[in-house]
Image (cartoon, rainbow, N blue to C red):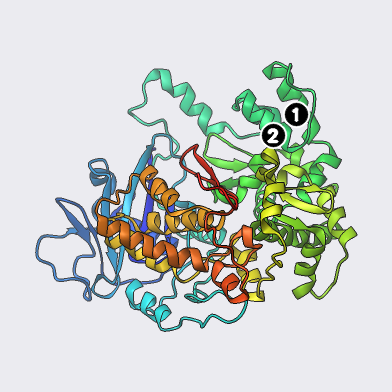
Amino acid sequence: MKGYQLKAIMEGSMRPIWRRLLVPAQITFSQLHQTLQAAFERTESGWYEFDFVDARVGSVGEQGGLPQDGDVIDAECQAIDELMGKCKKFDYLCGRKGCWRHRIEVEKVVEFFQPNYPSVTQYSGASVPEEYEGIKDYNNQMERRKKPSGEGEVGGLEWGDFKKYDACAVNDYMREKLNFPISGAKDVPDNVDESMKEFWEFMQTRGQGETLEDIFEFYSKDEIKMIAKKHEIKNISKLNKGALIERVASEILKKERMERFFVSAPDYVIEVFEEAVAEEGRRPIDITREFDYLFEGGYCGIDGLMRIYIPREVINVYKTFGTPEFHEKRKAVCKVLMHCHMANTLYAVSPISVVVDLYNRYEKEKVEESYIMGVCQEVLPEVCDYVCRGDALVDRFMLKEDLYLKLVKGQKNVPFYMPAKREVTYYFQNGYLETPKEYKELYQFLMDELDVEYYEEAYELCQVVHTVIRNGCHVQDLLQLLDEQEIEVSSGGQVKRLMEIYKKLWLNTRMIIYRGHSPKEMDVRGKRRNDDKVGKVAERPHGNSKVVHFPGNRD
């Protein structure tokens, strides 16, 4: 049986909200509607419609939708396979007068798809409360509820009404409630020739009793060496692939190595790991992003039935140390690491004393410098984006050519910014700093004037711009970044408008050269220098070019 990988994108949201799904090809559009409702955690049972270029499929006879100006195919009678094989994109509308609109992208065909039920494999954005009459209504409500910017706080939209997306619960629901009756699911498909039958039968049974060595057989030598580097395994450069697999698998199964790896694992990693353990090491195409930490450590793989699995030997070792006492220690370690990561994001060079001040600012249990240093030395270095240098944490990239020494010289006597509790909470929940409200203006400019087609692309680009400006990018570098993304700033008016927006962004962005303060805050303090081309390395995620700007660098 085959299936489809789809990406369902909620249109109109200020923040990306999308779900990537795997669905059986034999289901009807009515069943696809049920799937999408579940994926976005909605319960609407009324009108809906799927709009193709030359066809409309929907809930025939339902009231409350858009005016029907043509023939609509009954969704309960139309299989998705007949139409999806002919198109790459189509629209899905639901709710009163089609107030919820989604773009569905057919990303690929999965030739050997086993489950009878759909599943969410990746996602972005939490669920929108159902009381709003469409995404525009929700955006308007957020506009009216802007929070004023207080001292030490970032102003902007309050998105707290979004409830946390529980992908595991959604997939559990789909597996139980949307297990669509499809006959012959386990039979060899008619269109599989003789040469493929053996492979098909192998795919049905593969996944029983795999070991770490079985997983590594599918990896390249470089990928296995990356796992070895993560665990600080030495003297492997001259090993052939077979010997490398045997060495790395045996090393990472040692209790002390595994315990050191898991002690810095966040709660969400432990949750999905233990859910898989409860299901005999299997999770049917769950959220791969949630398993990234385990994949990077080499502790899980994907079997022939497209399930994430954890070998029994990994589970057995984990059970020898995964006690309540261990997890109490792990939670304490992760709390320290999050404060270290936030300090590194704000300052790039963070004295341990400053990390202690940041930690003790809002935590009930106070710590000393020796405790922070002890935690940083205990965890695997590759887990962190910083390293210990003397009595400070230094951003890993800043070690190149001793850039951190130049940065410290440029920072001079600027005091360290101490974020408000709201900012700390936001960072802990999202893993990055909150973007200032001024970035909404850039978002609108990208969508309205530079014709960025997809709102999620515009939002993600705003995040990149926030990072590069924070790290010292100048307006010319921003133009280059847009050019790399094939976004054309063609007219003089657009360039002028972009420069106006950039100035607002630059003034209100927290920068490492100012130790977390924004230039606007430094103006208030009377300490900002005239040189506005200062900062760290601006790494481009879609290219190899890098820009380094420090005080006095006018190239």
Q: Depth check: 364 or 108 in front?
A: 364
Residues under numbered marks 2 and 1 in contact, where contact means CB atoms less than 8 Å apart? yes
347 and 83: which is toward the camera: 347
- CA separation in Å, label 2 and label 1: 8 Å
Secondary structure of residue under mark 1: helix
Q: Can residue 200 be seen at all in this image of the molecule?
A: yes
- Quadrant in the rendering for residue 256: top right
Residue 234, horizontal then vertical, whole percent: 80, 27
Residue at horizontal 88%, vertical 65%? 368
- Count neighbours of disc 2 (C-alpha within 10 A) and say few if under 14, some if 14 to 19, many if 20 or more: some
Judge whether 364 appears above or below 334 on screen. below
User: Where 251 falls versus 434 (above or below)?
Assistant: above
Indicate the position of residue 376 as horizontal and vertical percent values: 81, 52
Checking the image for residue 493, the label placed there is: none
Identified by mark 2, the residue type is Ile
Count of picture labels: 2
Q: Is residue 542 left or right of residue 235?
A: left
Label 2 SS: helix
Q: Which residue is mark 2?
A: 227
Quadrant where the N terminus is found in the figure: top left
Q: Is residue 190 above or below residue 412?
A: above
Residue type pointed to by label 1: Val
Q: Which mark is residue 248?
A: 1
